[in-house]
Amino acid sequence: MLKALVFDLDGVLTDTAELHYLAWKRLSDELGLDFDREQNEALKGVGRLDSFEIILKNNGKTHAYTQPQKEECAARKNEYYKELIKTLTKDDVLPGIPELLAEAREKELKTAVASVSRNAPEVLERLELTKYFDTVADASKVKNSKPDPEIFLTCAEQLGVAPENCIGIEDSQAGIEGILSAGMYAVGINVTVTGRTPDLCLCSTEELKLDMLLENFMRRE
Ligand code: B16
Ligand code: MG
């Protein structure tokens, strides 16, 4: 029985990937590192420090920075990102999301946000979405980033719902792996599948209708 919807933030509720890209690009330019939109794709759903490691690896500079230097660089990128998210408003919520969240409330389904972004609470506030969620996982307390199921299991626990009664919605392969490993039903939004396949693949958040999700979820049971 479906009892809860667990949402990723970036790429599902809003599209902050471009803002993450601009912030990483600014830092990379300052450091003389090569970074482009294609590389940015691999950072979706990946935490801040791990993202910087990927950029360094792509540049053959994994060992060029000490750990404190890496942390300083990641913190600098975050300052740039925080400047950029000041521009977010409710108009930046992806299509279909407000309707889905309102329907979920009507049908008394629980809702959670499973984002590895430490800025998730501020982004949700700016999007005026906070009121729609029963719980938001605290990314700073999650030890294992996606594709580990930890953040999804944390959401299920915080909601008091068994993972098999949850649908997880994600736009990244890492997130899909996390949802499936948690034992939830996985819905992928425009995922470039490079590993395990989502239970349901959609092209856009516009296709997220509660009746359709319920129908597909029941079919699996
Ligand atoms: P922050 P999600 C992820 O959000 C982003 O996709 C990823 O690009 C970013 O590096 C990560 O959050 C950490 O974000 O630097 O704000 O803590 O997709 O899990 O909602
Ligand atoms: Mg995402």
Image (cartoon, rainbow, N blue to C red):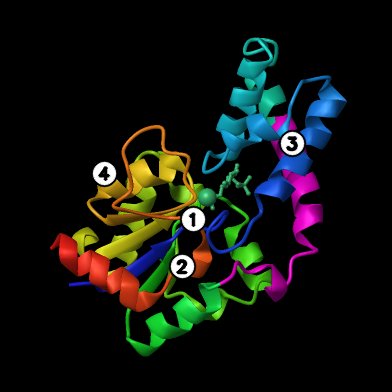
C-alpha gap between disc 1 and disc 4: 22 Å
In the structure shown, which secondary structural element does the residue marked by tag 1 occupy?
A: loop
Q: How many callouts does the rendering have?
A: 4
Q: In this view, does 102 lie above or below 142?
A: below
Viewer-side residue, 107 vs 114: 107
Label ID, residue 207 = 2
Q: Mark 1 points at which residue?
A: 203
Residue visible at 72% across and 41% down in the picture? 21
Mark 2: which amino acid?
Glu
Is residue 81 within the magenta segment?
A: yes
For image coordinates 33% across by 65% down, the residue present is 158
Q: Residue 24 carries which label?
A: 3
Question: Disc 3 on helix, strand or loop?
Answer: helix
Give me the residue at 71% from left, 48% from top. Answer: 18
User: What is the secondary structure assignment of the residue under circle 2?
Assistant: helix
Q: Disc 1 to disc 3, how far (Cα)?
A: 26 Å
Q: How far apart are marks 4 and 2 (CA)?
A: 24 Å
